[in-house]
Image (spheres, rainbow, N blue to C red):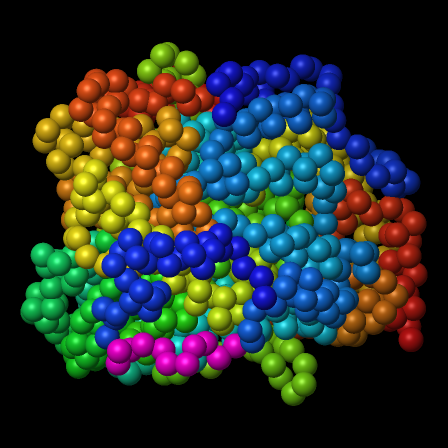
Amino acid sequence: MADYLPHTPEEVAEMLAFLGMSTLEDLFAHIPSAVRLAGGLDMPAGRSEPDVAAQFAAYASANVATSQKLLCFAGGGAYDHEVPAVVKALAGRSEFVTAYTPYQPEVAQGVLQAIYEYQTLVARLSGLAIPNASLYDAATGLVEALNMAHGANGRSKMVISAGVHPHWRAVAATFARGTGHEIVIAPLRDGLTDWSGVDASGAAAIVAAYPNYLGIVEDLSAAKALAVAHDALFVVGADPVAAGVLRTAGQWGADVFVGEGQPFGTALSFGGPYLGLFACSQDQVRRLPGRIVGETVDAEGRRAFVTTLRAREQDIRREKATSNVCTNQTLMAVTAAIQLGWLGTSGLREVATRCALGAHYLYDELLGVSGVRALSAEPFFREFAVQVPVDASEVILAMAEEGVLAGLAVSELTGGADPSLEGDPSRVLLVSVTERRTREEIDHYVNVMRKVVHS
Amino acid sequence: MGRESEPTLFELSVAGRSAFQLRTTGVPTRSLEELIPAQHLSDDVVDVAEVSERDLVAHFTRLSHRQFSVDLGMYPLGSCTMKYNPKFCDAVAGDPALNGVHPGAPAALIQGWLEILVTLEERLCEITGMSAVTLQPSAGAAGELTGLLMMRAYHESRGDVRRRVLIPDSAHGTNPASVTLGGYDVTTVPSNERGLVDLAALKAALGPDVAGIMLTNPNTVGLFEEQITEIAAAVHDVGGLLYYDGANLNAIVGVVRPGDMGFDIVHMNLHKTFATPHGGGGPGAGPVAVAAHLAAFLPGPKAARVEGHFDWVTPEHSIGRVHGWHGNAMVLARALAYIEVHGGDGLTRVAQHAVLNANWLRHRLRDLLPAAYDRVNMHECTLSAVALKQAYGVRGLDVAKGLLEEGFHAPTVYFPLIVDEALMFEPTETESLQTLEALAEAIERIVERAKTDPEALRHAPKTTPVSRVDEALAARRLRPTADASA
């Protein structure tokens, strides 16, 4: 049995004596005996670290879909990007890992300045002036954006493109149970949002995705025009890696940007912790959710950083706060700043370009496999959807036998029929390529697909 | 800690410098213009920063030297539970066979991860005395809102429209903020002179429109709500539910369980009770456990044992997803490793020693900073600087800043709101008697300074990376980025 308690039995006795007590039980004597737990917790006794390591090694060996065993072509908001040793080493420094929220700025300049640098990068990637210090993930970031829109115009109708990731839409629907927001989904037609199919009158927000979750880059002019016509906030959920080559949310006229920051230095991590990127226009600054760090000076006039505009936050404003968020994902934000620092201006552009090149190379090769068809002819960035001749889930399991994680079954993301797809989603496969995939690996993918769909 | 100020990444940038290295892929090169229509391609390159790897390492290492952390010293922040984070748990989470797993992979290919989730759920149910749990919420506040949405779904399933949620005046700010987002109105219940919920006031506030009450127990003052069974009965009598804010669960693990106290919904902060590192403000994890009558409303999909293997299932009346994927999985894995190393016996000892340390500290400081409620407390003690303020004009904040100069992190100041000049200390079980004594001696020196040189204390700290910062300027002239106009 291991533990991390420092006191010797003699010290425990000394401390109890100081309190006029004789046993540790005396500390709990004031708790009514009726509610006390008799007999202790019914779970295994403590074991040493090596013993527990063996238990976890068994779990690990039962996972097949690891980046070591399978070549990852799955995306859908979680991407297998390069994370170099230098980023792991810096982000793993215990000063960052074991710090608390920087409420005492005199001893938290390290985290505060790193967040300020992160915020600067989020502003540049989003094209919007006011970033925050991070949210949990993109899906909950979207919820915060909707709440911001409600706060801005008092309206409750949220018009969301079906091109927004199905999980993000699902999370928005869950939280709408409490806020009472009405969610209206604009369907996709041939991969593009059909805004004409929805009544946007009285909308609080128009929400578009860039690229959409099927990988397609939609021209957002129509969505922006719709938002302007109805005086609604224009919310864009964008892939931040795309900003390396594509227009930013701000350049499309977004009032609010949300994005998933996992691609910047965070491993696939079985889905979390990830990083909710969030930024808004100057007009919305008083409605910003969560923390924001600002530059100031200390008593000696030296540059210093501090959490600011605190009067919006839950610990001060309580039931009138702009959000209930307290703990966020600071370590992932710091990691993103480090990863982006490593990439630099040219590296970000290079990663975005290589993702696009790899995805298009695979797409072209894959369409040469008979039975595999494009879902849409619209342009895409780093991932794409194809129709396969059998159930996509079966394709994924069969290709895993050959060392390939072929992608995601769209029906698993949507949970069945969905306004993003005209028809049965069960044979739709979503495929992604990152800068880590070589031509040889992509060719292997194509060969395995050919074998699987023709067997 | 580093006193030299550090330029920003952008100030270190030199055009043309770079650090990145990528795989040689052999993928045929084409121009982006061939692949993506021109209206999408940006004319402006997003400017990141251009630094060498050596610059990058020096920059973030120097920043890290300007940062206090648990690994560096004691962090007696009340309510925040800044205990030592075992390195073993980080190592477990660092296994690429765990952190290299894509969250969208089919269940058949991630059996190990599903077993981790199911095992953690079983442990958390036993610890809380509840029937079922969701691991999706990313932090305590997310757990609160998830719990409130389940409370709402439960009442609605019974055709029962309810409007209000009761919250003690000592509650964390996340409670009322979450209640609003859950679509309920807040009714605040006052505390009595013993720092506990005023039972008579609670009963007066109850009615058929009350959906439930959110309670922290031990409460935010660090005291156990001794009338919890009476409170539970009164709330249940009007058809309301009891929500347990698990911010202070670490005080009672293995001693008393929320389920046995009558709670229906419990959130846990794994980054507090189960020692996952706080990461400078996150990530956390805020699983929510519920009693049997609420299990059908849990978020989904969730991992489950199904006929000899593991799979995803969605509860019958699930409120839906509350996370983009399955929760903060790497935090969940760390917490399970912590639980398995300790076992039921070890976790109970953790709670006992946390309470021992907090009581020792309160008693040791009794003549320096008297407790707001001077009796046996749980894992934290709420002291007050009101006497120092009256005698010398030295406030709680000044004491906190003085501690920074002494090499300790400050306690939580000015919370809970019901205590004047509150200083809330949570020493945690991982600090030694020698460290506690050193903290007490530091406070002795600060109290002495309050008497002899209060002016200096009001300007402390001076030895830290920066001295007191101009918070008003930061808000008035907002500069959240390096590009903000001067």
- Res A381 visible: yes
Above or below residue A175? Residue A350 is above
Q: Quadrant of residue A270?
A: bottom right
Q: Is residue A35 magenta?
A: yes
Depth check: A419 or B391 in front?
B391
Residue A277, horizontal then vertical, whole percent: 51, 42
Residue B160 belongs to the span the image colors magenta: no
Res. A102 image quadrant: top left
The quadrant of the picture occupied by the C terminus of chain B is top left
Q: Position of residue A337 (x, y in %)?
A: 59, 33
Q: Which residue does the image show at 27% across and 29% down from the upper left?
A: B446
Left or right, A238 with respect to A216, comes to: left
Residue situated in front as seen by the camera: B381 or A123: B381
The boundaries of the magenta stretch are A33-43
Looking at the image, residue B211 lies above or below residue A2: below
Q: Is residue A413 above or below residue B390?
A: below
Q: Residue furthest top?
A: A301
Residue B449: percent from left, percent from top:
24, 23
Overall secondary structure of the magenta section: loop
